[in-house]
């Protein structure tokens, strides 16, 4: 791996960390501006956006990334560029059609999904973002296939900064018109930020000089499109299933709660607590796993193409171990400080019981992102899709029964159970393609000993029940340092492994 590529990958990790941190600031400001009721309405609107976006992109970003990587590995620069052009044409057409359908059928969606005509305008405003996000996804896939991470990094950070700026400029003024007006302001802000991100990516594309050309004849457009769709459609269908899983969950939770006797207002507020506050905290650490997962798609594909199975196994095992250890650490922090974290960040302590339950999911949650990228890099998106369908059906069934019985905490129970099942199924699937040793000592026993030691020391010597902001922050820092020392003493990671992780799981 060249020094330039190491810098680019590390740059994406830093940018993702900054963007995710800014995103958490945005979510914090948003929750304090519109409250759990406003967050609940936004999450309902966002479900429609995710479905529309997933259909519009249809896995083209990952398909472009994988094909671009394959073409450039053999010096075929002409087909790499042609692949991008055809992908842009496809995504522009599909996203335009989706936008037109959304404009015309917004009333039906608002009535049938949520029985609330107030959501018609927010649904139609989603079209501001759909086309720009779809095109941006293709550009990002192309840059990733080129192993050029700077455009994605800058666009991510810029979008989050703009979202924060738009809260006082757009959302707060519209809040005077009611909670639906404020929800519309959130959608408008999101659209303007995404358009800015697309402009940044486009500028990078046209400013970057492509000095290398190949003398190979380009593939016929029909053949190249067929090859692209062969990769993209299974991934896109898998993304659609995943999106439907999230969207149906958001629709199902309030309905199940109301069936058990809860009011609509309480159900919407619970969605705000669960999807708008608790889950963003759980997914925040994926800032560390996202760049690694991103680099694994071309990295695994490259190792497989060159038949370097040793390198392939090393990348897979190291990425898996890192995400599991990360999950142990996050679970420790969530369990000890389940009340302080949401209070510090969002200003609401009611999320405490949800966070305490979700703490048990983190060990199995973060490796999923890695496993999906590995299966895509192995050219087995169909297997990932099969697993996703099984997990989606399981999730929806458990969600309906447990939310009906236990309320919103039942959604947290479901999240833990489904993530545990997903870890088992996905890992066994990868082992059926490439044998990966299950290292229970490094993956589970050593991190567990580190987390147990950290928990005991924190509970005995720190005032972990304090809600004083400064004391809580210091407690979290000390707990983190104790866990880090315990992890080093257990020799869970070797020095070379730590260097490889920093370089993006590539040498």
Image (cartoon, grey):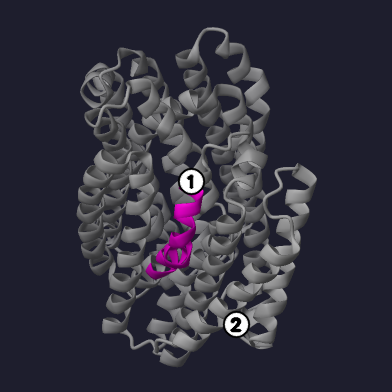
Q: Position of residue 499 (x, y in %)?
A: 67, 80
Q: Secondary structure at mark 1?
A: helix
* Disc 2/disc 1 C-alpha distance (Å): 42 Å
Q: Position of residue 414 (x, y in %)?
A: 32, 52
Q: Position of residue 354 (x, y in %)?
A: 46, 46
Badge 1 density bin: few <14, some 14–19, many ≥20, Cα 10 Å: some
Q: Quadrant of the C terminus?
A: bottom right
Q: Position of residue 473 (x, y in %)?
A: 74, 51
Instruction: Report the side of 318 relative to 365 (left or right).
Output: right
Part of the protein shown in magenta: 354-371
Nearer the observer, 412 or 310: 412
Nearer the observer, 96 or 343: 343
Q: Main secondary structure of the magenta part?
A: helix
Q: Residue furthest top?
A: 177
Q: Quadrant of the N terminus?
A: bottom right
276 relative to 166, above or below? below
Residue located 24% across and 64% down the image: 387
Q: Which residue is mark 2?
A: 507
Nearer the observer, 304 or 49: 49
């Amino acid at each position: 791996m060249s020094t330039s590529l190491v810098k680019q990958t590390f740059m994406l990790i830093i940018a993702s960390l900054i963007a995710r941190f800014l995103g958490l600031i945005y979510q914090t400001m948003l929750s304090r501006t519109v409250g759990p009721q406003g967050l609940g309405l936004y999450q309902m609107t966002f479900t429609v956006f995710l479905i529309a976006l997933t259909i519009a992109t249809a896995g083209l970003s990952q398909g472009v990334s994988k094909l671009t990587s394959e073409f450039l590995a053999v010096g075929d620069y002409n087909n790499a560029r042609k692949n991008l052009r055809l992908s842009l044409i496809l995504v522009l057409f599909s996203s335009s059609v989706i936008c037109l359908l959304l404009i015309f059928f917004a009333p039906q969606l608002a009535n049938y999904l949520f029985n609330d005509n107030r959501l018609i305008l927010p649904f139609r405003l989603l079209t501001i973002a759909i086309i720009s996000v779809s095109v941006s996804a293709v550009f990002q896939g192309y840059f990733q296939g080129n192993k050029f991470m700077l455009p994605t990094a800058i666009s991510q950070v810029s979008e989050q900064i703009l979202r924060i700026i738009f809260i006082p400029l757009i959302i707060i003024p519209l809040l005077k018109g009611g909670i639906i007006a404020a929800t519309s302001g959130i959608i408008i802000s999101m659209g303007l930020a995404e358009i800015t991100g697309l402009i940044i990516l486009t500028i990078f594309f046209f400013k970057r000089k492509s000095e290398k050309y190949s003398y190979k004849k380009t593939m016929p457009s029909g053949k190249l499109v067929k090859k692209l769709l062969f990769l993209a459609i299974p991934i896109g269908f898998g993304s659609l299933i995943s999106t439907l899983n999230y969207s149906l969950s958001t629709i199902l939770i309030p309905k199940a709660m109301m069936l058990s006797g809860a009011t609509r207002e309480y159900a919407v507020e619970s969605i705000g607590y669960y999807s708008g506050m608790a889950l963003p905290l759980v997914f925040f650490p994926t800032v560390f796993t996202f760049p690694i997962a991103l680099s694994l798609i071309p990295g695994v594909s490259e190792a497989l193409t060159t038949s370097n199975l040793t390198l392939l196994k090393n990348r897979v095992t190291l990425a898996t171990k890192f995400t599991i250890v990360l999950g142990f650490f996050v679970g420790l922090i969530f369990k000890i400080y389940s009340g302080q974290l949401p209070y510090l960040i969002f200003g609401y302590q009611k999320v405490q019981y949800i966070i305490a339950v979700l703490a048990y999911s983190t060990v199995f949650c973060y490796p999923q992102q890695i496993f999906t990228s590995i299966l895509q890099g192995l050219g087995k998106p169909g297997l990932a899709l099969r697993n996703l369908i099984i997990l989606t059906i399981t999730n929806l069934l458990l969600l309906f029964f447990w939310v009906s019985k236990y309320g919103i905490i039942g959604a947290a129970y479901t999240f833990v159970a489904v993530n545990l099942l997903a870890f088992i199924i996905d890992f066994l699937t990868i082992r059926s393609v490439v044998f990966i040793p299950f290292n229970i000592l490094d993956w589970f026993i050593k991190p567990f000993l580190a987390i147990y030691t950290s928990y005991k020391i924190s509970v005995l010597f720190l005032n972990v029940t304090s809600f004083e902001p400064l004391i809580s922050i210091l407690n979290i820092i000390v707990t983190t340092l104790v866990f880090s020392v315990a992890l080093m003493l257990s020799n869970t990671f070797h020095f070379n492994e730590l260097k490889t992780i920093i370089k993006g799981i590539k040498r």
